[in-house]
Image: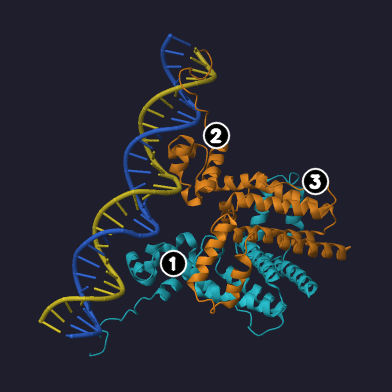
Chain colours: A cyan, B orange, C blue, D yellow
Amino acid sequence: MTAGTSPDRPPRAPLTRDRVLQAAVALADADGLPALTMRRLGEAVGVEAMSLYTHVANKSDLLDGMIDTVFAEIDLPPSDSRDWRTSMRLRAISARRALARHRWAIGLMESRTTPGPATLRHHDAVLACLRTAGFSIELAAHAYSALDSYIYGFALQERGLPFDSPDETARLAQSMLAQFPADQYPYLAEMATHHVLRPGYDYADEFTFGLDLVLDGLERAVSGQR
Amino acid sequence: MTAGTSPDRPPRAPLTRDRVLQAAVALADADGLPALTMRRLGEAVGVEAMSLYTHVANKSDLLDGMIDTVFAEIDLPPSDSRDWRTSMRLRAISARRALARHRWAIGLMESRTTPGPATLRHHDAVLACLRTAGFSIELAAHAYSALDSYIYGFALQERGLPFDSPDETARLAQSMLAQFPADQYPYLAEMATHHVLRPGYDYADEFTFGLDLVLDGLERAVSGQR
DNA sequence: GCTTGACAGCTTACAGCGTAAGGGCAGAGC
DNA sequence: GCTCTGCCCTTACGCTGTAAGCTGTCAAGC
C-alpha cells in the first residue's frame, strides 16, 4: 500500500523510448513500413498516438531510432582479430541477415542522416578491423565503400523480390514470364526458365558469390599495398 | 477556322501519360519524392489533381512509369560486342549516373514489382551481352546479381550523403564529428579528418574502385569456367 | 444543322496521416 | 496541506490519395 504504484490497478509498465522503438520495429516487420503510423503504434503499446511524442521527438526521430536498433543487431568484428577477411565476411553475412529480417530498413538508410550510437560504434569497429589489419586509410575507405555498397545493394534487390520463399518467387516469375512473348526478351526468358524457376533456386545463395568476389579483390589490393 | 482546335484559345497541348511522367520526374528531381503529390503534379502540368487519373491508374502506376523512364536513360550494352568487360563497365557507369541524376529512384526500386518495357529491355540486353560472351547461365546470374548489387548499393550510399557537392559533405562531416568526442570513435574520426575532409575528396570517385574489383573477379571466374 | 455519345478535365467529399495546442491527473518534494 | 513535474489524454488543422459524379467540348451519324 505504501509502495510507489497503486495496488489495485495493473501497473502498465511505464512506456519508454526503448519500448516504443521495439514495438515500432515489430510492427514494421509484421505489416510493412506504410502500416507504421503513429496511431497504430500507439495502439500497439496501449497508448494514444499523441502520447508517443513524450518519448520520441517526431516520426523522423522514431525512424532514426529504429535504424539504430537494426545496426545494433549486426555482429561487430572482434576488435583483436588479425584475420580481417573472415571478420569482414562474418560481418557482411550478419548484416545481410539483419536487413533481411527487417525488410523496411534498407529503404530507410538512404534518408536518415543522423546516425545513432550503435551505428557509429558499428562503423568504428569495422574501420578498426581494417586499419589494424594493415589497410591504409585510402584502402580502408575503398574497402568499406565496396563492401557496404555490395551488402546494401544485395539487400535492396532481395527486398525487391515479391515474397520470401523461393516457391513464391518462382510462381511470380512464371506469371511475369507469361505476360510477354518469350521471343521479345529471349535471354530473360532463358534465365527464368533454365535457372530461376529450377527447383531449389534461392536468390539468397547468390550473396556469398559476390561477397567473395569483393573480398578476393580486397585481399589482392592489400597485399599489393605492402 | 475550319481546323480542329478553336483558334482564339491557346490549344493547351492535350495531356498524355508521357507528359505526366516527365513532369513527375522533373518534380521529384527538383524537390524530392515527398514533394511529388498528385495536386502539385497537376499544378505542374496545368490541370487539377483528379484529371491526372485519366492518364495514370493511380500513384503506384505513376511511380512504376517513372522508374521505367529512368531505366530508359541507362545506356544498353551494344548487342554485338564481344568485349563484355568494357560493355558492363560502361553500363554500370551509365546506371550510376542515371541514379545520381534521379536520387529518388533508388529508394523506389525496392517496392516496384511491375517492370516496364524499358526495364525488361535493359535486363535482356545485359544478359545477352554476358551470354554471348561465354558466361554460363549460372555465372551470368551470379555476375548480374553481383554487378547490380554493387551499383544499387553504391547509389544508395551516395544518395544518403546530405548534399551533392563535396564541400557540403565535408562541412557536414565536420559538424557530425564535433558532436561526439573523437576518442570514442577514434577510427571514424581518423577517417573523417585524414581522408574525407581532405580537399578534393569526392565520394563518387570510389565507384570505379569497387566496380573494377567486381569485374576483375568476374573475369577470373569466366576464364576459369572455360 | 442537329443530335448523340465519348471522354478529358473539374468539383466535391472522405478517411487517414503527422502533429500543434492545451487539459487532467498522479506522484514527488516541501 | 500545497505546488510542481511529467505522462497521458482530447481536440483540431492542414495535408495526403482517390471514389463519385458533373460539365463542357469535340466527332460521327442522320
Q: Which residue is mark 1?
A: A62
Q: Residue furthest toward the bottom? A: A2
Label 1 sits on what residue type?
Leu
Label 3 sits on what residue type?
Ser
Q: Nearer the viewer, residue A121 or B156?
A: A121
Q: Residue at x 71, y 53 (%)?
A: B93
**Which secondary structure, mark 1?**
helix
Q: Quadrant of the C terminus of chain B?
A: bottom right
Q: Mark number for residue B180? A: none
Task: Please name which of the two marks, 2 or 1, marks the residue nearer to the observer.
Answer: 1
Image location of residue B200, percent across then percent down: 64, 59
For the residues marked 2 and 3, what is the alpha-carbon distance in whole angstroms?
A: 32 Å
Q: Quadrant of residue A159?
A: bottom right
**How would you rate the neighbour count of disc 2 (Cα within 10 Å): few for under 14, some for 14-19, many for 20 or more?**
few
Tell me if label 2 and label 3 are in contact, CB under 8 Å.
no
**How would you rate the neighbour count of disc 1 (Cα within 10 Å): few for under 14, some for 14-19, many for 20 or more?**
many
**How would you rate the neighbour count of disc 3 (Cα within 10 Å): few for under 14, some for 14-19, many for 20 or more?**
few
- Does residue A91 sit above or below C11 in this rendering? below
Tell me if label 1 and label 3 are in contact, CB under 8 Å.
no
**Which secondary structure, mark 2?**
loop
Q: Which residue is mark 3?
A: B79
Q: Quadrant of residue B170?
A: bottom right
Image location of residue A123, percent across then percent down: 59, 73
Q: Is residue A104 visible?
A: no
Q: Mark number for residue B16? A: 2
Image location of residue A142, percent across then percent down: 69, 67
Chain label for disc 2: B
Q: Nearer the viewer, residue A225 or A181?
A: A225
Image location of residue D15, percent across then percent down: 39, 48
Q: Is residue A175 left or right of residue A54?
A: right
